[in-house]
Amino acid sequence: METKTKNSVYPLVMTAVMAAVIAAVAPFALPIGPIPITLGTLVMYLAGYVLGGKRAGVAVLVYVLLGAVGVPVFNGFTGGLGVVAGPTGGYIIGFVPMAFLSGLAVERFPQNRLLQFVGMVIATAVLYALGTAWFCVQAGKSLAAALSVCVFPFIPGDLAKMAVAMVLGPMVRERLVRAGIHPAQ
């Protein structure tokens, strides 16, 4: 009975813990324009290594829902439906498929770092597409204007976050496995 309980509880607890870590890190942001730089995306990339695609997506969804109901977990310690419906809301919603797709790449290609990286790049492109489309609609900006303030400045930082996640993620995963608390065990 202990194994069945452990197997059903650990994934839920780890998913909740990852949502809490994202919520704790994401509010700290460096405002460089309408879209701030945050370490929340780094933790979302790491979630793929810790949880896999499906659970990483769920952890980020929990984070988004917490913020949507008013918990101040978004950049600058903001929250509420107004933030989600505002100009940056598409990026907030886009975090969910980004985390899912990044985690899926890690799951599908556990030994192939190049394909993991390609998966993270594709996942981030989905994030950029959703967020930029929403920003254009909400802010009334052209695609070129939105790309210049919402995407291009973030590419180097996001690539760096992916690299950091690719170094730290396997180490964290291995330690969780050795400790017997990795959710996939």
Image (cartoon, helix red, strand yellow):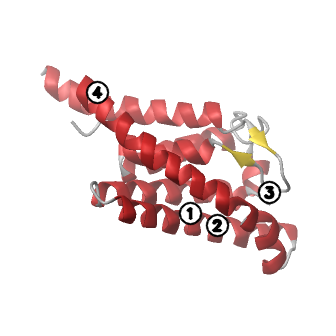
Dot 4 alpha-carbon crowd within 10 angstroms: few under 14, some 14 to 19, many 20 or more? some
C-alpha distance separating marks 3 and 2: 16 Å
Residue 56: horizontal and vertical position, in percent? 44, 47
| Nearer to me, 84 or 152 | 152
Can you identify the residue that label 4 sits on? 181
> If you read the primary sequence from the N terminus, does the residue marked by circle 4 or circle 1 appear first?
1
- Of the residues shown, which amino acid type is indicated by label 4? Ile
Tell me whether circle 1 and circle 2 mark residues in contact (CB < 8 Å). yes
Residue 15: horizontal and vertical position, in percent? 42, 36
Instruction: Answer with left or right where residue 148 lies relative to residue 49.
Output: right
**Compared to 173, does 106 lie above or below?**
below
Location of residue 6 (image quadrant): top left
- Of the residues shown, which amino acid type is indicated by label 2? Tyr
Location of residue 72 (image quadrant): top right
Q: Residue at x 26, y 23 (%)?
A: 179
C-alpha distance separating marks 1 and 2: 6 Å
Q: Element type at marker 4?
A: loop
> If you read the primary sequence from the N terminus, does the residue marked by circle 4 or circle 3 appear first?
3
Can you identify the residue that label 3 sits on? 86
**Compared to 183, does 82 lie above or below?**
below
Tell me whether circle 3 and circle 2 mark residues in contact (CB < 8 Å). no
**Compared to 18, does 3 lie above or below?**
above
Can you identify the residue that label 1 sits on? 124
C-alpha distance separating marks 4 and 3: 38 Å
> If you read the primary sequence from the N terminus, does the residue marked by circle 1 or circle 3 appear first?
3
> If you read the primary sequence from the N terminus, does the residue marked by circle 2 or circle 4 appear first?
2
> If you read the primary sequence from the N terminus, does the residue marked by circle 3 or circle 2 appear first?
3
